[in-house]
Amino acid sequence: MSPRKVPDAVAAGSAPLSAPSATPEPTPERRRRPRIPEAPPVPAPPAHLNDYEPIIGKPQLDELRFLGRGLSGKTVKMVNSTAVGGGVAEILNRLVPLMNELEVHTKWEVITGGDDFFQVTKGFHNALHGAAYDLTKEALDIFMMYNEQNRQRMEFGEDLIVIHDPQPAGLVRSKEASHGRWVWRCHIDLSSPHPGVWDFLRPLVEQYDAAIFSSASFTRQLSIPQYLFYPCIDPLSEKNKELEESYLEKIADDFGIDRSRPVITQVSRFDRLKDPVGVVQAYKLVKKYVDCQLVLAGGGASDDPEGAAVLAEVREAAGDDPDVIILNLPPWCALEVNALQRISTVVVQKSLKEGFGLTVTEALWKSKPVIAGAVGGIPTQVVHKLTGVLVHSVEGCAYQLRYLLTHPEFAQQLGKNGREHVKENFLITTNLKRYLVLFQILLGVTQPRPAA
Amino acid sequence: MAAAAQASVATRRASKPFYFNAESHLTRIGRERATNLTELLQGLKSCPDASIFYHTFQTLREHHYIRGGFSNDFAQWTFAACNEAGLAERLAAADVRDFTSVQEIRDRIVDTIESYLKANPASGARPAFEPFYFCASVTVVTPTPFVANTLPEFTEALRQVSLECIHHHFITARLRPPLTRNDFSVWLEEEMGLVSLAERLNRIDIYTATLNDARQRILQLVQQAMNGAQA
């Protein structure tokens, strides 16, 4: 196989993406160097509750306010292990101000720990996802020591304490001395955990009053009530807010995308579990029938050796096809990702293993027809042939791409259904409502009505 | 005469107002799960009523924007995860309007699966592509500011209320006394004396329409009544 001619624009990880190429090579006009922001933009101010009215409607806002009034004067503490980065911090950054706006006084605290603690919790995290792990007494001692330190440092005088994920799970040992109700919010998939790690955590988890999981398939049999809270997106965040057509044009121009032809996009970090090479293979099968472009946009290749290796594999698979546009984006490119999703004709998420798959949620919210692997939380979002299409192979992905690209009315209906599905289930306002209802039930503010 | 009747329908005051409420739901994850049809059957027999309610009535709310498709989770899973289209169609035919209790719905679904497995015994143990997780609905009723004393007030409110409100009054109401009837029809008949209109609302097909379609159809029927059609 001849070496792939890699435009420097996509040779991320080795040089700044916007730096001039040392050895420029001829490329078609649309494949000129992508213009990618080199520095994070100024963060947008957080949205207020009223800002959501055009999206969810006044009745829904009234309902949130009513539920909030039932909790007026109650106090809530959210605890997790990081203030920045990661999905949990992203959600809490939005959720906590909204709760306070409803006068449900909510504090957010972050536990502290040394490198040894976070090394252990990272090991636990992977082990709980089913990875092999050498569980030692030392690791357990480190975990409990830091939990104990944080427990001594923190106060738990609130009416409701919500502990996010396993890292601070041991704080529940303060429950007996507090008057509050304790909830464990588990954001990870516990369907096949490392037995030793789970046996250690389980007695802690079962001290809580309730647990929350992101999918019914992520749960374990527990002695406490378990509730289903889907992960959510914020429709007003940079990644999801409406964009001007002129901005979409600019991004298409910056990235060399020809909007007169269909665009297939997968947004994911360069990770084998996202199967970017499989997406390229599917695109090649489609290309025989439909003149289209493929955009693979993601990150993870600059600071992760495995990501860089996967990026190289993707380039190799793409060959010298100028219609395959590979973008290794820095983490601050939320607006650009938003635009790429909106520019797309079809969005693909051909994961082989997945958590919940919020990139799918984002695409559905933008009314895009989505083709996705039937793994993790994706089937919850993509109801086959109703809100998108589920696939299990490269060939299946290619066939469905051909079908959707040649049946735009069906594709449009899927996109329309998908947006409604997200509006109903996966927006931050729905997440807020779920918390309010759960808090009301736990505090006995309201009695749930029997089903029938 | 007709004009007078028309005016009287439009201006008639109810003997009691209609208070619009909405529902907020939480999903509780149950203990039962099924990896094949035999296990689904076992789960159906042992799960709480709230699970049956969730997988039938709640599906109508959660997928309210889809016309067609399967009307309950049991049918959807049987089709998508077990590839048993014939059984799925029969399960989907269970119309929540025909039942006066969750127990009746449970019995109907159990009977349907038992009959199918009797005729197709090999289907019982065939592994599904993905498990079925029994969940249950926890519901909190929340009031809304909307109150109607007349048909114009009723239509104005109906245009503005959330779909949860319509689901509460038009779908789940059928399991509350008086059984099999929706709250709107009960109010129109008992408090407004509009028997025919009440009956026409009760006949709106909630399986071939979205909740928004149902809203539009109700508005259309009420408007016709105010315009002088038979009420």
Image: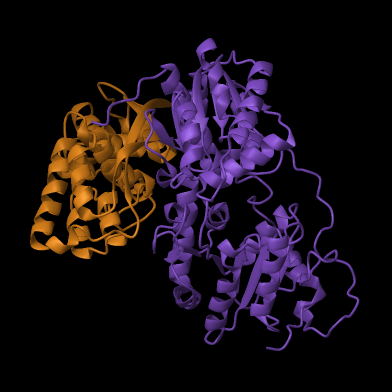
Chain colours: A purple, B orange
Residue A146, horizontal then vertical, whole percent:
66, 27
Q: Name the residue at 24% across, 34% down.
A: B48
Q: Name the residue at 44% across, 65% down.
A: A389
Q: Is residue A434 left or right of residue B110?
A: right
Q: Residue furthest front?
A: A137
Q: Nearer the viewer, residue A69 or A26?
A: A26
Q: Quadrant of residue A228?
A: top left
Q: Quadrant of residue B164?
A: top left
Examine the rendered structure and indicate whether residue A78 appears above or below residue A24.
above
Image quadrant holding the N terminus of chain A, namely bottom right
Q: Nearer the viewer, residue A134 or A53?
A: A134
Q: Is residue A399 left or right of residue A16?
A: left
Q: Nearer the viewer, residue B144 or A161?
A: A161
Examine the rendered structure and indicate whether residue A361 appears above or below residue A75.
below
Question: Is residue A251 visible in the rendered structure shown here?
Answer: yes
Residue A360, horizontal then vertical, whole percent:
54, 56
Image quadrant holding the C terminus of chain A, namely top left
Q: Is residue A114 left or right of residue A95?
A: right
Examine the rendered structure and indicate whether residue B193 appears above or below residue A410.
above
Question: Is residue A82 visible in the rendered structure shown here?
Answer: no
Examine the rendered structure and indicate whether residue A162 appears above or below residue A305.
above
Give the total of numbered labels. 0
Residue A58, horizontal then vertical, whole percent:
52, 35
Residue A89, horizontal then vertical, whole percent:
65, 38
Q: Name the residue at 57% across, 82% down.
A: A284
